[in-house]
Amino acid sequence: MQFINYFNQDAYTNIAMDAWLLKNLHPDKPIFSLWQNKRAVIVGENQNTFSEVNADYIDAHDIQVVRRVSGGGAVYHDLGNICFTFFVPVASSARVDFRQFVKPMADALESVGIHVDISGRNDLEIDGKKISGNAQRYAGGYLMHHGTLLWNTNVDAMVRSLNVADEKFISKAAKSVRSRVGNIKDYAPKELTIEKFIAQLQYYLTNEGEDEEYKLSETQKNDILKLRDEQFSQWSWNYGKSPKFMYNNHAKFDGGSIDTQIDVEDGKITDINFTGDFLGVRDWREMKAQFIGLPFTRQAVSQVLEKNKDGQYFGSITIDELLGTFFQKDEVSNND
Ligand SMILES: Nc1ncnc2c1ncn2[C@@H]1O[C@H](COP(=O)(O)OC(=O)CCCC[C@@H]2CCSS2)[C@@H](O)[C@H]1O
């Protein structure tokens, strides 16, 4: 199989590249790529980004959040994770079997001495632990099948990045399926490094190095960068495309309790209500209009609360306590 070199480790660029190549590459024969992202969470096409990521952790650790064009759940990437993409001409989307792509990757791993099982969900597993997740997108006679390979990803950071108490979010969005994950490195021959591992997969998939690189032109590269800038790096795509949702939370404080209910559409607050047992000096509804149309982010909401703090709308409940009812606080230190 011929291959394409993705030209950097920026998740905005790489997710844009997957999408652009699916629409524009139109290969006669299958082409693949192996690539990597710096720390990022990649959410599925129809997911609610707000409920899938731990916003505080993501912000504190400079983790990119990008929506891809394939379905499925949210995954965490770092430089210990390897991504692969196949672009394949197909007769019709109905005939495409997930296993058709999962199997060659399983064989590639076998060729470097790593035995994996294919789960009922078409994840790759070692020892009952997921080491690869896969997703697909069909468009106009071509299929993009992409997946991950966990070599030595920081699982602690993965769990913290993806963690959110999602029962507070009510919507029709696709939910991720949490799994017990493992790293391939723990099962690989001792001397195998990630560089050698990638080189060996490449060797296997290129028919022992026989098949050549498909070189992108400068124009093609520029088109990809344009798509990144206009779509895949934009908040309006990565967050704003989340299906509309309702956020519900109940919180108890020394100064009373608050039930918060917020409607969000296109990532923006369309309605907000506070009920419960708190004694505001003034009625919070006086500032209700200021919330409408704001992005559902800690920063935007806290600005409104700060600006209006003299009104003591929530009695003895502090702004920080109140913000905690919207957004979870990352309890973890920022040293890692
Ligand atoms: N990098 C990575 N690889 C495998 N599994 C992961 C990863 N990160 C998190 N997880 C686990 O999978 C579930 C989500 O599983 P779920 O089955 O919901 O979603 C997926 O697998 C989607 C895979 C998308 C692959 C694309 C390829 C190129 S860009 S992203 C998550 O809660 C974790 O438990």
Image: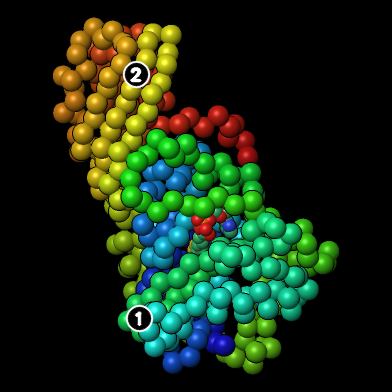
Q: Are marks 1 and 2 in contact (CB under 8 Å)?
A: no
Q: Which of the 4 image quadrants contains residue 116?
A: bottom right
Place of residue 300 in the rendered image (x, y in percent of width and height, measured from the top left): 30, 33
Q: Residue at x 38, y 65 (%)?
A: 69
**Image quarter for ligand 1:** bottom right
Depth check, mark 1 against mark 2: the one in front is 2
Name the image quarter holding the N terminus. bottom right
87, 141: nearer the viewer: 141
Q: Position of residue 193 (x, y in %)?
A: 75, 66
Task: Say which residue appears at 28% left-offset and 33% top-offset.
Answer: 262
Marks 1 and 2 sit apart, C-alpha to C-alpha, by 51 Å
| Disc 2 secondary structure class | strand
The three-letter amino acid code for the residue at tag 2 is Ile
On the question of residue 152 being in view, the answer is no
Characterize the local packing of mark 1: few (<14), some (14-19) or many (20 or more) Cα atoms within 10 angstroms: few
Q: Which residue has dot 2 on it?
A: 258
Q: Which residue is mark 1?
A: 24
